[in-house]
Image (cartoon, helix red, strand yellow):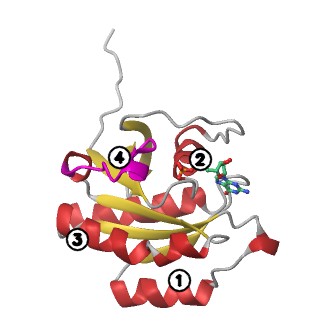
Amino acid sequence: PERIQEKIDYVFKVVVIGDSAVGKTQILSRFAKNEFCFDSKSTIGVEFQTRTVTINGKLIKAQIWDTAGQERYRAVTSAYYRGALGAMLVYDITKRQTFDHVARWVEELRSHADSSIVIMLIGNKGDLVEQRVVQTEDAVEFADDQGLFFSETSALSGENVNSAFLKLLEEINKVVS
Ligand code: GDP
């Protein structure tokens, strides 16, 4: 008998970047596996995870790359950005410095990635309401200025993680089709 196989229409490479400990790995595992790991250890070396979703009737495999700790050593290389159609640029709403560094990450993307890359700015750890130091309006203003999409997420609760990725994938789909 003929085997029915789902046919992937597109593979979209997405990179997750931002300062160390903002929650990049947790956001990725929340989206790819719907998991949050309380005792995660960062491993050295670039890794990716995938999740297949349907967007506008197309089957799209998101291949999402994690720096796996390399951002600490400024070792994120051009190979990491090569072929990336989207980027999740993550900061921690409870750590001002991680937001102050976002401009540098945008520069990094502009110099290493394709000029049509779709960028989503993510303010993570939204569950830590009491510790918030980066105001939503400041991030919205920055995102508007730079032409980035924006969302606040919590990898811990899962809030907005799916919708942020889906929005990014939808926007990439608009660029490629
Ligand atoms: P990375 O270095 O950017 O990949 O950050 P990790 O994903 O390893 O997360 C760094 C730390 O922040 C870990 O202790 C996580 O458990 C914690 N963390 C990540 N996301 C969240 C979140 O949404 N809320 C809270 N409260 N903690 C988080």
Query: Which residue matches tag 1?
Result: 139
Residue 126 on image: x %, y %: 69, 67
Which mark sits nearer the N-terminus, 4 or 2? Answer: 2
Instruction: Work out which residue is located at the far top of the displayed protein and give it.
Output: 1
The segment highlighted magenta reads 66-78
Give the labeled residue for mark 3.
110
Q: Position of residue 173 (x, y in %)?
A: 30, 61
Label 3 with label 1: CB-CB less than 8 Å: no
Q: CA distance from mark 4 to mark 1?
A: 29 Å
First along the sequence among labels 4 and 1: 4
Quadrant including the N terminus: top left
Residue 148, quarter of picture:
bottom left
> Hey, what amino acid is under mark 4?
Ile
Q: Closer to the N terminus: mark 4 or mark 3?
A: 4
The question of residue 76 being in magenta is answered with yes
Task: Give the labeled residue for mark 4.
Answer: 60
* Residue located at (36% from left, 22% from top): 4
**Image quarter of residue 5:** top left
Amino acid type, residue under disc 3 in the picture: Arg
Left or right, 77 with reference to 134: left
